[in-house]
Amino acid sequence: MRYVLMHVSDLHAGRPFRPALAEQVAREAHALKPDLLVVSGDYVQRADFPHQWDVITRYLRTLPEPRLVVAGNHDVPLLNVYRRIFRPYDTYRSRISPDLNPVFERPGLAVVGGCSAHGLTMDGGYLSLEQRETMRRAFERQPAGTCKVAVLHHHVVNPPGSEKRKMISNAEEAVELLDQCDVELLLCGHVHMSYIGTTLDVRPDLRQGTIICQSGTTTSGRGKGRERGKNSYNVIEIEDEVIRIGQHMFLEDAGEFV
């Protein structure tokens, strides 16, 4: 068994979007030919503006398939309070994906997405009981030996040196869910800074822990901390007994992600 995943995040169509850089990402994605392209949320900068959805839906059509996508907090309306609270996912469902809990299954691999974005906060995330149970059922039906990968927008651990962005408010429950379901890898974004770690960093009492693979912003000018002004994505190779994670960062001198 060998699978290659390409993980991009925080595209932010709108004022921060870098179209030329986005085209480079598309070229590299087609050259890589991943078995799955994962996009971990924040497709637009402001979900209230239809033009930004037009830009991002056109761009997504240039990326290879299959794709697994989850919603981010910027994909929920901000200015329209009614829609933000009562119908937060309407535009996301119609323009990006109707499925808030996508699942990608192949022999020996299961990738399960969850929706941590909601309308009650501008920045933070929350994994509801419904979301947790839906993800649990998807993981528990997998046969023994399956490599299980979870995808969320929000992070469960603040990376060292990062701004203290609001992560999933019930991170303890999310981390325990991953451990109970034998999830080996979590893909996430939100903080616009790359990070590789493990949930054991904050919960050494866990049974086995979960590798955390966080992507910086792939196509916007909103990099944070040590990645201020920079862009990145991750390539993950999954084999029978090994997971390899490679961070790819755009270097101006090279004109490509290295």
Image: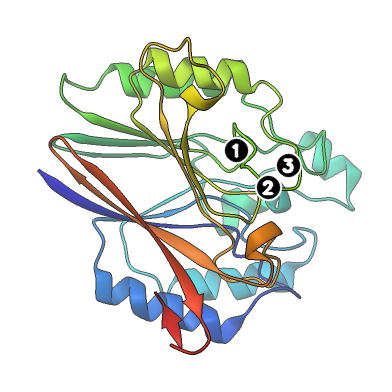
Q: Are marks 2 and 3 in contact (CB under 8 Å)?
A: no
Q: Quadrant of residue 20?
A: bottom right
- Where does the N terminus fall, quadrant-wise? top left
Mark 3 secondary-structure assignment: loop
Q: Relative to 179, say whether 168 is above or below.
A: below
Residue 190: x and y in percent read: 64, 49
What residue is disc 1 on? 155
Q: Hey, what amino acid is under mark 2?
A: Gly
Residue 92: x and y in percent read: 62, 52
Mark 1 secondary-structure assignment: loop
The residue nearer to you, when weighing 67 against 145, is: 145
Q: Hey, what amino acid is under mark 1?
A: His
Q: Earlier in the sequence, mark 3 or mark 1?
A: 3
In the rendered view, does 215 fall on the left or right side of 91?
Answer: left
What residue is disc 2 on? 161
Q: Earlier in the sequence, mark 2 or mark 3?
A: 3
Q: Nearer the viewer, mark 2 or mark 3?
A: 2
Q: Earlier in the sequence, mark 2 or mark 1?
A: 1
Q: Residues within 10 Å of mark 3 (few under 14, many from 20)?
A: many
Q: Hey, what amino acid is under mark 3?
A: Pro
Q: Nearer the viewer, mark 2 or mark 1?
A: 2
The residue nearer to you, when weighing 67 against 151, is: 151
How far apart are the two marked residues, 3 and 1, measured between alpha carbons? 20 Å
What residue is disc 3 on? 88
Q: Residues within 10 Å of mark 1 (few under 14, many from 20)?
A: many
How far apart are the two marked residues, 2 and 3, measured between alpha carbons? 32 Å
Q: Relative to 130, say whether 3 is above or below.
A: below
Residue 79: x and y in percent read: 90, 53
Q: Are marks 2 and 1 in contact (CB under 8 Å)?
A: no
- Where does the C terminus fall, quadrant-wise? bottom left
